[in-house]
Image (cartoon, rainbow, N blue to C red):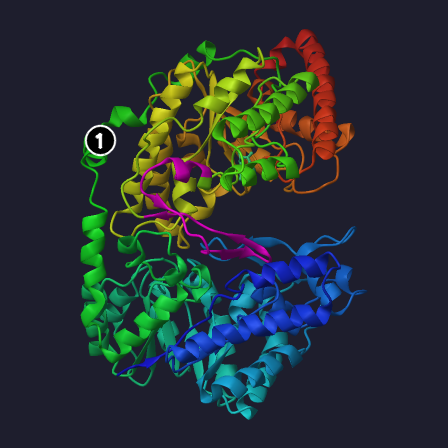
Amino acid sequence: MNITQTLGYPRIGKNREMKRALEAYWQGALDRDTLLATFAEVTREGWRAQLAAGIDLIGVGMETLYDHVLDWSVRFDLIPPRFRDLSGLDRYFAMARGVPGIPALDMTKWFDTNYHYLAPEIDASITPQANFGDFLALIREAQAMLGAHVAPIVLGPVTLLRLARLSVDFGEMLSALLPLYRQLLDELKALGVTEVQLHEPALVFGDAAALRPHVEKAYAELSKVGVPLNLVTYFDDLGENYPWIAALPVDVISLDFTRGDNLALIQAHGWPQEKTLGAGVVDARSVWRVRPAETLALLETLRGYAPQMRIGPSSSLQFVPYTAAREKALPAALRGVLAFAEEKLAEVRLLATGETGGMDAPWAEFHAFAPADPAVRSRIESLQPSDFTRALPYAERRPLQVQLPPFPTTTIGSFPQTPEVRRLRARFNKGEISQAEYEAGIDAFIGYTIGVQDGLGLDMLVHGESERTDMVEYFAQKMTGFAFTQHGWVQSFGSRYVRPPIIYADVSRPQPMTVREFRVAQSYTQKPVKGMLTGPVTILNWSYPRADVPRHIIAYQIALALRDEIADLEAAGARAIQVDEPALREGLPLKPDRWDAYLTWAVDAFRLTVGHAAPQTQIHTHMCYSEFQDILPAIDRLDADVISIENARSGDEMLRALAEYGYPREVGPGVYDIHSPVVPTVAFIAGKLASFVQHLKPEQIWVNPDCGLKTRAWDEVIPALRNMMEAVQQVRSKESETRFLHPASLRGNHV
Ligand code: GLN
Ligand code: ZN
């Protein structure tokens, strides 16, 4: 019988209590005490579940009002100057969300998950100080309920600094933090905790070797306290750093055995016999039950190396919903193989006790329920290189495509999702209105959206996506192979939760998904309307994929479904089609040496989607996040005719990089940040365009906002686009003068 442990648990409330409470609090409709009482209740519910499941060492400390990394910024008093006039919860939420005039901390993705954390911001004005009251109170409260089962979770110093926006020396700041960490460990020791989990996922990054002196120094210091330490890493293996990390002076090292290959490292280098291995063998980021044959064999092998072992989930369980048992609307055969947080706790326990006898049965039932689709499989097997390549190269197909004025203007796809749009969809979903009434309502929104764009004089229009709640869910609902939960929410950030679809079988497209709305939109205007699709990599990355088919094959299946959609859109008259891939960049593996493998299939999936588009069809793509510098060859290999990218919040690094690379096709760098309610001025946008012209050839440049407009209101969108059009008119006349006077500059790159 092994000991069991957890590394964190869902914390949003089974019925999204935290979302409701936070949003009411922000609106002034709920007081502080009620918010904190809700938090306490949600927290206790998570502890109760883990205790009831028989978990021996329950990780406590990831529970949070907004974000666990922000919590540690506050606990070490890492408060940037702009927040220092505020205090308490006001300051906490200002750091999370900003207030007028005070921008929030930077929010970014937590490793390769779809959770977003707030990056600590540390400049020379910061002197860390201990502010551990809330944390120690939480631990004491946990001890009152869980006794010796409490294992406090502390974000490790190396990861805290590695994730920070740091404008001071790493080593110096570490030296300033370490005495505070020691103080915290002392206080935890005084509380009599069995051990402390120090979460250091940054040790799986490709550049962890550079951190070695810092890590060794930190753990030499922290081990002096004398409270047992559990060094926890997850999301990948330790790679070349395994030998020295395994030698750190800690009592337990917890590793993820569901991603990367920590097993191979142990086999190659052995396991330090004096240490306990925390074996993360239950995948905390998939929704699937354990496949007992594989997991039991893994445990058997691990036991051979590490006589002292405990069993647990691979990371915090916050990446899966609370319980699959509640999803009564799903077919029983599918529900039987789903494991969310509660089911995973039970699995951990079964694996620890060895009572794994019944674990096979649901899988047998599932395979009978969701057999392979022979048509889909044979289509994948017969793919040829020509399926991944457009018939003509860009230079030859471009003259056949739509001709628009210089600096063509467009938007990224969505237009305001007003309360009326949402009400219409809700009424339809409840069965209050008929399909025909619903479609008529949508068509009215499309008509209005087209009218606005036409009126403003945009060159390439969109239908506005009013029929879509979510760019992935919309397509997933129209394809086979996807299942949807009713309660399966997971935190994306703060009070924003998502309900990712589950890909449980082969994917295909029974019928057209977007053609009706495209036709309606195009019927209202002479201007070209872009068909609007979500790309295969984004659909995959924002779903829970099945585990028994390689990811690239799932992506190809989705790509083939989308390819058929493109053919239908072309037949309906689409001259341009956009395939959004905002999640392509964020799917990059944590270790750069795996980037190539990922980018190869991810780009191939995109190329497969658009490979059979007619040369006359202009293929657009869109990506959020502007850190493309390091993947430009992959962006280039997409072979999209036009790419629009989020840009307004970064300087002109991205433009510079595109110019340096010699990016050969058309680009629409965003001219204003759609995340802000501020309407950009003509001068602001003209300034952006002037910098585009400095870096790119004029004939390469498209003009568009940063991203979709669905979160904005019409009275923000219309003036913003009007200013965008005005700025474009200025540049157009300026450029035509230049061309007339200096025709030689026409082709030149103006750098
Ligand atoms: N076409 C989508 C929209 O405009 C793109 C969204 C995104 O990039 N995340 O909403
Ligand atoms: Zn975007």
Check if residue 490 falls in the magenta segment.
yes
Check if residue 401 falls in the magenta segment.
no
What percent of the width, then of the height, locates residue 237?
35, 63
Which residue is farthest top?
740
What percent of the width, then of the height, locates residue 602?
36, 39
Residue 668 in the image: above or below residue 10: above
Is residue 173 visible to us here?
Answer: no
**Which residue is at 29% across, 55% downward?**
332
- In the displayed structure, does residue 120 sit left or right of residue 281? right
* Quarter of the C terminus within the rendering: top right
Where is residue 241, by image quadrant?
bottom left
**Residue where numbered disc 1 is placed:** 379
* Quarter of the N terminus within the rendering: bottom left
What percent of the width, then of the height, locates residue 455?
69, 17
- In the displayed structure, does residue 122 sit left or right of residue 293? right
Q: Which of 326 and 26 is in front in this view?
A: 326
Q: Nearer the viewer, residue 133 or 646?
A: 133
What percent of the width, then of the height, locates residue 243?
33, 72
Residue 705 in the image: above or below residue 53: above
Q: Nearer the viewer, residue 685 or 747?
A: 685
**Which residue is at 37% across, 80% downward?**
54
Where is residue 639, by image quadrant?
top left
Residue type highlighted by circle 1 = Arg
Residue 17 in the image: above or below residue 180: above
Is residue 712 visible to us here?
Answer: yes
- At numbered mark 1, what does the secondary structure look like: helix, strand or loop? helix
**Which residue is at 72% across, 69% downward?**
32
Residue 280 in the image: above or below residue 82: below
Q: Which stretch appears magenta?
A: 474-503
**Image-quarter location of ligand 1:** top right
